[in-house]
Image (spheres, rainbow, N blue to C red):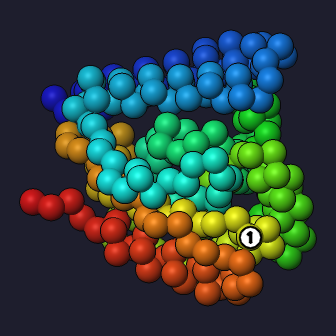
Amino acid sequence: MQLLRSLLFTGFFLLFTFLYAIFFVVASLVLPWRGRFALARFWARTILGASKVICGLDYRVEGAHNIPQGEACVALVKHSSSWETVAQTVLLPPQVWVLKRELTWIPFVGWGIRQLQSIAINRSAGGSAVRQLIDQGRRRLAAGQWIVVFPEGTRMPPGQTRRYGVGGAAVAAETGARVVPVAHDAGYFWPRRGLLKKRGTIRVVIGPPIQTRGRDPREINEEAQRFIEAHSGPPAG
């Protein structure tokens, strides 16, 4: 039964996303950036609501008080499923995303991503990609936009991680923007591979902001990674 529910949800997810992307691209022609982001947030809330109704998969947030108000930050988010790529839009203040440029080539969906001023990176470019991220990130932060980064670079199986990429921490160190670490256990409920979504409640933990001014990006990464991995373990029980 849960597999059937998961198949139904996946069908809804794909169809609604495609149709909404067409509407979004057209609406973006007349809306400012914050209006576009509000539409993206509505999409995310709809997907999260559908996962709760269809699959019985909900979430709860701990540490929401750690989100700075009136200040643009860099969020480093655990990457273990597709759930957080949706939920980040709801969990954090208006934001842009750092992602691989290939995603912007997808018809309608990719065009919508570009309209949201995402920072599309050529990951094979090495050091120049980091420089590009710093240059664009500086402008986004100055405009009051948060920057959301998945520092692992790819979805990791539950309980696993890898060395965090330096890009997000480098932007923060260059600009003095604080880093907000975001941990969760979504990978145990919404696996990175396979269709089955398990019933339950995803736990999201938002950590205290990390000061970055005058610090080495690698040191910032290590502090963020310690928090994120310590709070991304398997669900209790």
**Residue at image x 53%, y 66%?**
209
Closer to the camera, 50 or 177? 177
Q: Is residue 131 above or below residue 185?
A: below
* Residue 114 picture location, percent across and down: 79, 36
Secondary structure under the numbered disc 1 in the rendered image:
loop
Locate the N terminus and report the quarter of the image it occupies: top left
Q: Quadrant of residue 187?
A: bottom left
**Residue at image x 52%, y 18%?**
16
Q: Is residue 43 above or below residue 186?
A: above
Q: Residue furthest front?
A: 70
**Residue at image x 29%, y 45%?**
60
- Is 154 on the left or on the right of 114, as rendered? left
**Residue at image x 81%, y 45%?**
143
- Is 16 on the left or on the right of 26, as rendered? left
Residue 69 visible from this viewpoint? yes
Q: Is residue 78 above or below residue 200?
A: below
Crowdedness near tag 1: few (<14), some (14–19) or many (≥20) residues, C-alpha within 10 Å? some
Closer to the camera, 188 or 97? 97
Residue bearing mark 1:
176
- Is 175 on the left or on the right of 19, as rendered? right
**Residue type highlighted by circle 1:** Gly
Q: Quadrant of residue 59?
A: top left
Closer to the camera, 213 or 139? 213
Q: Is residue 52 above or below residue 159?
A: above
Residue 76 visible from this viewpoint? no
Q: Quadrant of residue 7?
A: top left
Locate the C terminus and report the quarter of the image it occupies: bottom left
* Residue 113 picture location, percent across and down: 73, 35
* Residue 91 picture location, percent across and down: 47, 43
